[in-house]
Image: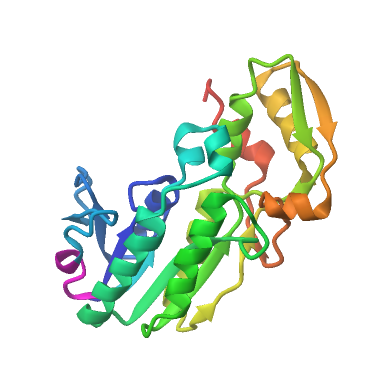
Amino acid sequence: MALTLVTGGTGHLGRDIVDRLVRAGSRVRVLARTPGVRSNVEWAAGDLAAGAGLQDALHDVDTVIHAATFSPIARRGGIRPIDFFRSPSAVDVEGTERLLACAEKAGVRHFLHVSIVGLDEATLPYARVKLAGERLVRASALSWSIVRAMPFYYLLDRLLAGLSWLPVWPVPTTRFDPVDTSDVADHVVTCAFDGQRGVRTEIGGPEALDLVAFARQYQDARRLHRRILPIDLSETKARGMGFVASQGVRGHLTWTDWLRRNSPEA
């Protein structure tokens, strides 16, 4: 049975990808700095940033799904001034470069890289780091695919939760369509095994709304009452910050339904 290696397999998206592969009867190996307790997958101890354990992790691997990333904003659930000036590249650039080199040596047949919609016009340091990693994949001699996804609901939830202490929320009016990791995982797994290669159709959520609407739905779901101050952004600034609407396939789970499923009382 062909073996699939998943990087980032302990993260939000990675867990959903692994779940789908296991349900489909695939043989799955997860690269992690600390192996987990899940018994229906193989664990490979390794570190993309340090380059440790990659050759062993890729032994006998047919397909790599590279979902690992390091976003300080996602990790802490909020934006700080430093995020407008720099973002670590050890995982997304140097780590991707190491993984590609080792995958080529190991004879991997398909390397699927998970990326982000709108990188070409985005100016935030994390987006530039992600684009640099994506360009390494495009230049690789491996047979590769790239799937770009919109930002995830769980991140939007964290960012809005970080505003809860404010009496007034400054919120851009720009439109975008965040998506649930479960829908992205379905699309990624399909793209990994349908035989097609190259830049694949990007995926976003089922609704393209302005951020003010998403914030109001969040307040309704969390029973918050805060004044929202709409902030107009030019299209150029909005795209620079990654606020775009995807032009590919759409997920199924709406923001309202996600909030209901992930209610603190649920």
Residue at 59% over, 42% down: 84
- Residue 243 seen in the figure: yes
In screen coordinates, is 26 left or right of 68? left
Q: Nearer the viewer, residue 25 or 197?
A: 197
Q: Nearer the viewer, residue 148 or 52?
A: 52
Q: Quadrant of residue 1?
A: bottom left
In screen coordinates, is 158 left or right of 97? right
Applied colour scheme: rainbow
In percent of width and height, residue 13 lies at 45, 51
Q: How many marks?
A: 0
The answer to whether residue 59 is magenta is yes
In screen coordinates, is 164 left or right of 2? right
The answer to whether residue 159 is magenta is no
Q: Quadrant of residue 121?
A: bottom right
In screen coordinates, is 90 left or right of 128? left
In percent of width and height, residue 64 lies at 33, 69
> In this picture, is 181 found above or below 186?
above
Q: Hey, which residue is sitting farthest front in the picture?
A: 85
Q: Nearer the viewer, residue 204 or 239?
A: 239
Residue at 76% over, 17% down: 226
Residue at 49% over, 72% down: 135
Magenta stretch, residue numbers: 55-62
> In this picture, is 81 found above or below 162?
below
